[in-house]
Image: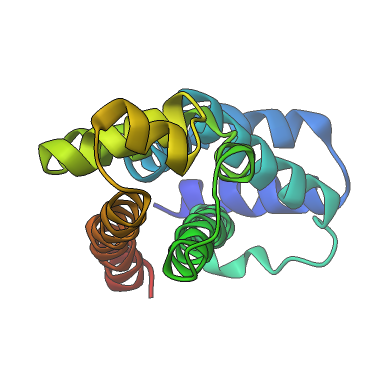
Amino acid sequence: MNQFIDFDEKLYAGLRQGDEAAFTVVFERYNRLLYALAYRYLKSGEEAEDAVQYTFMKVWGQRDSFDFRSGIRSLLFTILKNYILNELRHRQIVFEKHYEIAQQGEEVDEGFLKEFESKELKEHLWSAISELPPQKRKICQLKIGKGLSNQEIADMMQITVPTVKSHYTQAIKLLRSAIEPLIMLLHAVWLYFFY
């Protein structure tokens, strides 16, 4: 057991001194575990890779200011957890913004898509849209997917513009309520396991 403590102490000392070999050992020991955790919450390979890269860059960039006594694993998990929570908060803010826009009855077309440039976020959005009632789903597909205006959608579906707006506003509310509990659950899970 003391052998592992001595090894870790040498590893921490090497990290503090900028030893790339020590950093490589840490990377090889933890990168897969961090990737698996990030992927579980972000549901995207690219975003999980970004989260892991950010974590190791932060450790390397601030290695002289970190206290490694609590363990490198704990430090890595804390950095990763904070990164993922920030990403999830950003997603929630985007949904809230579009909910407010829909409540005001404003046109939402290109701006909506620009906010959802992340591939993974688009996948979550389309998955949630596919669960909507048929008319709301169709309106979202035409508005978000094809960029049609309220008038174009009303003409195509043979309904009034206020009906389109009403269904779209309700759809945004349903999408938000479908995503928000997931974000809160993930936050609670992180707090339970890492605090």
Name the image quarter holding residue 79: bottom right
Q: 133 or 81, which lies in front? A: 133
Measuring from the top left, give residue 133's x and y in whole percent.
11, 43
Q: 149 or 56, which lies in front? A: 149
Q: Is residue 180 above or below residue 175?
A: below
Measuring from the top left, give residue 151's x and y in whole percent.
45, 39
**Residue 52 falls left or right of residue 92:** right
Q: 117 or 26, which lies in front? A: 117
Q: Is residue 104 visible?
A: yes
Q: 141 or 59, which lies in front? A: 141
Looking at the rendered structure, the number of numbered marks drawn on it comes to 0
Name the image quarter holding residue 124: top left
Q: Is residue 123 visible?
A: no
Residue lying at 53% horizontally and 64% vertically, measured from the top left: 97
**Residue 118 falls left or right of residue 170:** right
Measuring from the top left, give residue 31's x and y in whole percent.
52, 32
**Residue 70 falls left or right of residue 57:** left
Measuring from the top left, give residue 111's x and y in whole percent.
63, 45
Residue lying at 54% horizontally and 60% vertically, measured from the top left: 106
Residue lying at 22% horizontally and 43% vertically, measured from the top left: 136
Q: Which of the image's four quarters has the C terminus?
A: bottom left
Most extreme residue toward the bottom is: 195
Q: Is residue 35 above or below residue 94?
A: above
Residue lying at 44% horizontally and 43% vertically, measured from the top left: 150
**Image color mode:** rainbow
Most extreme residue toward the left is: 133
